[in-house]
Structure formats: structure tokens, C-alpha cells
Amino acid sequence: MGEILRTCCCIAGGGPAGMMLGFLMARTGVDVVVLEKHADFLRDFRGDTIHPSTLEVMYELGLLDEFLKRPHQEVRQLAGQIGGEIVAIADFTHLPSHCKFLGLMPQWDFLNFIAEQARHYPSFHLRMEAEVTQIVEKAGKVVGVTAETPEGELEVLADLTVGADGRHSVVRERAGFSVVNLGAPMDVLWMRMSRHPTDPAQTFGRFDSGRILVFLNREDYWQTAYVIPKGKADELRQQGLPEFRQELVRLAPFLQDRVDELRDWDDIKLLTVAVDRLSRWFRPGLLCIGDAAHAMSPIGGVGINLAIQDAVATANILGGRLRQGIVSLGDLQAVQRRRTFPTRATQRMQLIVQNNVIRRVLGTTKPLTPPWPIKLLGRWKFLQRIPARVIGMGFRPEHVQTPEVRAA
């Protein structure tokens, strides 16, 4: 017999949605177990953007000052180079929030911070190296999960099971949820290269005929995204790494003296882009949130923040009900109903950009010039507040409504 745990809320997945929900549930007095399949959070090339909506949540929790002591970068404007012209896109300095900037922080630092705060509450339990393999059902209701650990099989029985295990969610697959695939015309190659004091100062994107290159300023290095047409990664590798290095130099000549830092293809990580969502996020005893409920495109870097907003809404709606032990199907439906509009609106925005910008840029050989909406952003700067609001705060930002319950 393997180990058996009993808890009020079991969360599969220790990513942004799972860790934030686990923290919020423990903070409000709910016994919670979070299962994370890896031994630590140290995985590179994951979403590193912390948007003002998330920073506002940190403020409401009384954690903002402590959080901002962690190494991070602050982006107050976004710009891009289209063809030979540099254009301003978004200005975050007018947002109605305490932090009027986009934060850049390695996701492992963010997750470690949340874990540290959550451990202040005795009802929080984090199990690393616990890979969820199956859901446990009884009389048509999900009553927990099984997981593989170094010590053997673990069974966690819970009043509520939450699938927060990402876009390749085992929970949603085992539960038989129907997935609506919205499509994506691109994949992304992520890499890092050193940054020199003479390099451009800000985070920016470079759009040229058939090519897109995005730079995130991480102080001593560039986190770099090379956008390619969907499924073209193998073709690119066959052309050889020297050719790929020269392609980067053609797009960004200042990289000439450091592209050899890319020693082999192992230094370049492929992100297979998907945009999808579940038709129904819940079953009796089970709820999916974050990427498990809706995989997002990297456009705008909003995936991590939408996941965190899901967690806040879930805690707001279900926290009190879980303390009473009476979570109903209607309660789970209320979470999906609350989060459906921001999910669909965000994905709709991403699809518009994918189909009208990304697809056209990657599919053309003609010289690029900024389209008229981008020109308007440069001409009337107050218009830059619109994309900043959509990216920075999102649609229907959530606010912490759960009380903090300290153990006696």
C-alpha cells in the first residue's frame, strides 16, 4: 500500500496558478496539498513577465514591498522596430495600479517567493517530485488523485481537486474534458545571450520580412525569442546552426560578437505554441484553471497573469465554501462563469494579432512598414495607454476578497 493523504483541497501542478491558489487557500484557513512533479522550480524559458495586475494582487496581500526586493527588471514602455522604423506601442505609466510597470522576474523566483509565504500557514502542504498520474473517482465524483513519488505511489483524497498542471494537463486528459483548439500559426525558439552596456536599453521586438525577433532585457543577458512559422523548427535545424546565428545577426547586428554563445541546438529551446480552452472546466469534485483550462499564446506575455487571476477568483468563490465543506457543482460553475469573459476576450485579442500581424509578417517577402494603427500610437501618445491597459491589467482583473485566517 502506498501513502494516503486526506485534505480539503488537492492541487495538481505547482506553476503560477497552482501555487497562488494553494497560498490563498491556506491563507484563508483551508487545508491544501499542492503536488509538483519536479524537484524544484528551476526551469528556464518559462513565462517571466509579472504584470501590474499580478503586482496589484501582491499589494492587496501586503507582500508587494517584500516581493520587489527580489531581483527584477521594470519595463514602463514597450516598443518595436518594424522594417527600419522604431515605433512605441504601450505606455504603462498611466495605469490605475500601484505598480505602473511590467516586471521581469525568473519564474522560479516568483514561485519560490509564493512557496515561502505559503509555508507561514500550517494548512499549506507542498509535495515536490509528486507527478500526478490519475484521478480518483467514486460514484461519478472526482475525490482525489494518485501521484508517483520517489517513495512510491501517493494517493491524495480531497473534497475538491484542482487541475493546474499546464497545457499538457494530465488531469484534464484523465477527466475526459473536451478541448477547443483555436490554432496558432507560429512556434517560438527561446535562447539567452549576454547583454553589453552599449546594447539597446529597453525590451523590444524586431519585425522584418518573414522574421520576428523579440528581446527581453534581463540586465546582464537578453532573453530572446525567435518566432517561426508553425512546425518549421526541424527545417531550421537542418539549415545548420551557423546559418541560424547569421540570421540573428542580420536582424540584430549588435549580436555579431556573441552569437557563438549558442554552441549547439541544446542552447535553443522550442516552445510549441497552442491556443485552446476547455468547453467545460469542471466536473463534480474537480475544477481546471490556468493553462489546464485555457492555453494562451505568448503574445503579450499574459498567460502567467491570467492563470494567477484564475487562482484569485477561485479562492474568492470557493474558499469559504471549502471551509464549510459544501462545494457544489454550481460553485464550480461560478468560477468558470466568472473567468470565461476574460479568457475569451484575451484569446480573441491574441488571435487578432496572430492572424493579422504574425501570420502576415512571417508569410511576406516584401519590405515592412508600420501599419496605420501602429502609426497612430506613435502620433498620439495617449493611445498607447490602450494596449498598456489590455496587456497590463487584462480584462476583468481580480481582487483578493478572502480573509486571512491565522492558526490559534
Image: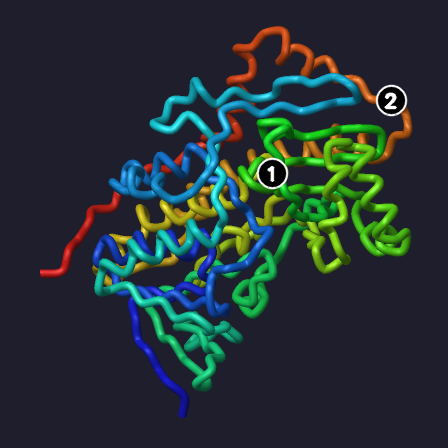
* Residue 36: % across, % down: 46, 67
**Would residue 70 be visible to someone looking at this image?**
yes
Against 236, residue 127 (above or below) is below
Q: Specify few, some or many for label 1: CA neighbours under 10 Å numbering under 14, 14-19, or 20 or more.
A: many
Q: Which mark is residue 252?
A: none
Residue 367, numbered circle: 2
Left or right of 105? Residue 373 is right
Q: Residue at 35% of width from left, 34% of height from top?
A: 56
Give how far across and how far down residue 18 sits, in percent: 42, 57
- The 10 Å Cα crowd at callout 2, few under 14, some 14 to 19, many 20 or more, is few
Q: Secondary structure at mark 2?
A: loop
> Which residue is outermost to the top?
379
Q: Which residue is mark 1?
A: 347
Residue 328: name its quadrant.
Answer: bottom left
Which residue type does callout 2 highlight? Pro
Q: Nearer the viewer, residue 147 or 244?
A: 244
Dot 1 and dot 2 residues touching (CB under 8 Å): no
